[in-house]
Amino acid sequence: MLERPRLVIATGNRHKIQEMTEVLGQWFVVEGLPKNYDAPEETGHDFLSNARIKSETASQRLNTMALADDSGICVDALDGAPGIYSARFAGRHGDDEANNDELLRQLGDLAMAERGAHYVCALSLADPRGQVFACSGEWFGHIGFQRRGSSGFGYDPLFVTEDGRTAAEFPDDEKRRASHRARALEKLLVWLEQRRTQVPG
């Protein structure tokens, strides 16, 4: 059996690292970023370009394969906002409570039929030779009127899925099979399987 190559997950989000490690641990020796790592500025105009910036920068700096994710929620009534600004929608990066409050404020009393939304996850896998594979996944639903559920993170308590539950009401294992990130990771796994003998070390 071939030795698994090293893979750095280029994010500081522990939820994402855990989720990706569970999926990719059979393929790679997975690591997080070094504590002193200075993340690049995300200057892209869409999820995929930001994911590429993060993965290519980490791959070059650390001389290893690197996987980056850029994800967020796009709300139809807000013309796709918050989109790539999902993590700092309310002004401060990573404040989930404030971001959810701001989303509810902007949607006001719009009817459920007008509250369509979808999560997006873009993945970019880069190696030090400059090769990149990118893919994305989406999860469609609506924005509810109040928070429900205690699992997940981000906008999960407001994101109402097709079966009526919020993403925060999904058990972790079920969410990891249904989410936008799961769908993107599934595409990555298909690509890896097709190139099983070509995965660079």
Image (tube, helix red, strand yellow):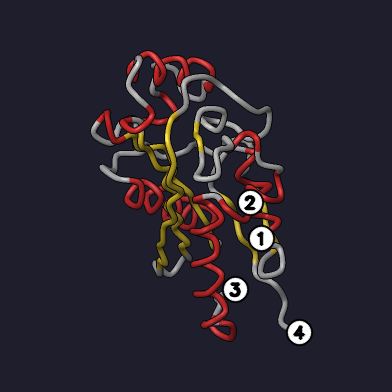
Q: Which dot, 2 or 3, sits closer to the camera? A: 2
- Tell me which amino acid carries mark 3: Gly
How would you rate the neighbour count of disc 4 (Cα within 10 Å): few for under 14, some for 14-19, many for 20 or more?
Answer: few
* 177 horizontally vs 103: left or right: right
Measured along the vertical axis of the image, is residue 161 above or below residue 145? below
Q: Are marks 1 and 2 in contact (CB under 8 Å)?
A: yes
Q: Which dot, 4 or 2, sits closer to the camera? A: 2
Q: Which residue is mark 3?
A: 201
The secondary structure type at the circle numbered 3 is loop
The secondary structure type at the circle numbered 2 is helix
Quadrant of the rendering where the C terminus is positioned: bottom right
* 150 horizontally vs 179: left or right: right
Q: Position of residue 26 (x, y in %)?
A: 71, 68
Q: CA distance from mark 3 to mark 1?
A: 18 Å
Q: Earlier in the sequence, mark 3 or mark 1?
A: 1
The secondary structure type at the circle numbered 4 is loop
Q: Which residue is mark 2?
A: 176
201 or 177, nearer to the observer? 177
x 52%, y 19%: residue: 146
How would you rate the neighbour count of disc 3 (Cα within 10 Å): few for under 14, some for 14-19, many for 20 or more?
Answer: few
Q: Earlier in the sequence, mark 1 or mark 2?
A: 1
- Tell me which amino acid carries mark 1: Val
Residue extending farthest right: 1
Q: Which residue is mark 4?
A: 1
Measured along the vertical axis of the image, is residue 62 above or below residue 90? below
x 67%, y 50%: residue: 174
58 or 47, nearer to the observer? 47
* Marker disc for residue 23: 1
